[in-house]
Image (cartoon, grey):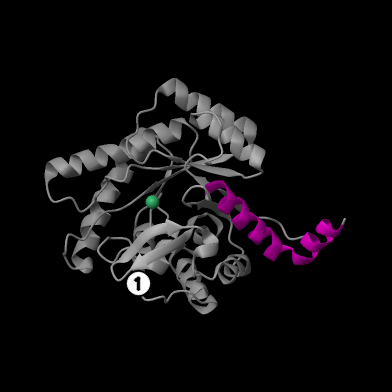
Amino acid sequence: MRQELLRFGTVGSPQTTSASGTPAAIRHIRELGLDHLEIAWTHSVSVTEPTCLQIRETAREARVSLSVHAPYYINFNSQTDDKLMKSNERLFAAARAGFLAGATDIVFHPGSYHKLPPADVYPIVRDRLGAVVHRLTQEGVAVTLRPETMGKGSMFGSLEETLRLSHEIPNVLPCIDWAHLYARTANGSFNTREEFDQALQMLESYLGERGLKQVHFHLSGIAYTPKGEKAHIPMYESPQRFVDLLQAFIAFGLAGTVGIEAPEPFHTADALHFQALYRHLLNPIHAAQETED
Ligand SMILES: [Zn+2]
């Protein structure tokens, strides 16, 4: 039986969690048989220290790994000092609290091009992110920062940009959102096994084994317009070729975590289905025998 190297979970508490709060969500992830939770501090980080410690302890007991999705209002290409300072503070807050809560990875949206040429924006984002990483390292906040691939051509966050950042700055690795990469092309391309393999070859050429063995992905169905991402949709309603995508994950021996984003009421169901599809593709004969028993 081939070993499972990818841990599946939800981005945000699974919709079927009966009680409020992150500890309840972690326990529910375990009940569901999932392995990971991405804590969605997407509007603000307003968590107390005792709660962080409680989250940490609950996750340790439940053997659930944790990441944090930092607030949406982060932009490393902010156009004023004041906006940049507030943006940085949001990422600092997410990283410090996340680290205290036992999260190893902090996902964030890197920013907008503000109609500047992408090549001009790249060094700005790299230098500013580098400064944030430097300060967190000095503070002893040992987390991996994960710039996410973004679903609109107007947003900083192509696959190549996130890989370059990861190559050039320590403690940075990409959060590859496959739905966003598909929507970003806005023409239905980036949906074949060949293209998935090329993307993973690029991941390997920039980051080597480290890139393949510590992945953090987002998976979901997605609808797009000519401008890119429109909305997340249920996996079975999406035109994305998930079987080919997961077969590529397996062929490259990827290890790490996969956070599922899906609109309600599909949130929990899609996470379970992606995990089941992965298991089936990993061990098709074993899966079939188990069902017969
Ligand atoms: Zn995101």
Above or below: residue 117 compared with residue 134? below
Residue 109 visible? yes
Q: Quadrant of the C terminus?
A: bottom right
Q: Residue at x 51, y 77 (%)?
A: 192
Judge whether residue 269 is colored magenta.
Answer: yes
The residue tagged 1 is 186
Q: Quadrant of the N terminus?
A: bottom right
Above or below: residue 188 compared with residue 103? below
Residue 191 vs residue 215, the one in the foreground? 191
Circle count: 1
Q: What's under tag 1, amino acid-wise?
A: Ala
Q: Position of residue 51 (x, y in %)?
A: 46, 24
Q: Position of residue 149 (x, y in %)?
A: 38, 60
Q: Which residues are magenta?
A: 267-292
Q: Secondary structure at mark 1?
A: loop
Quarter where residue 250 is shown: bottom right
Residue 203 vs residue 180, the one in the foreground? 180
Quick check: 101 left or right of 42? right
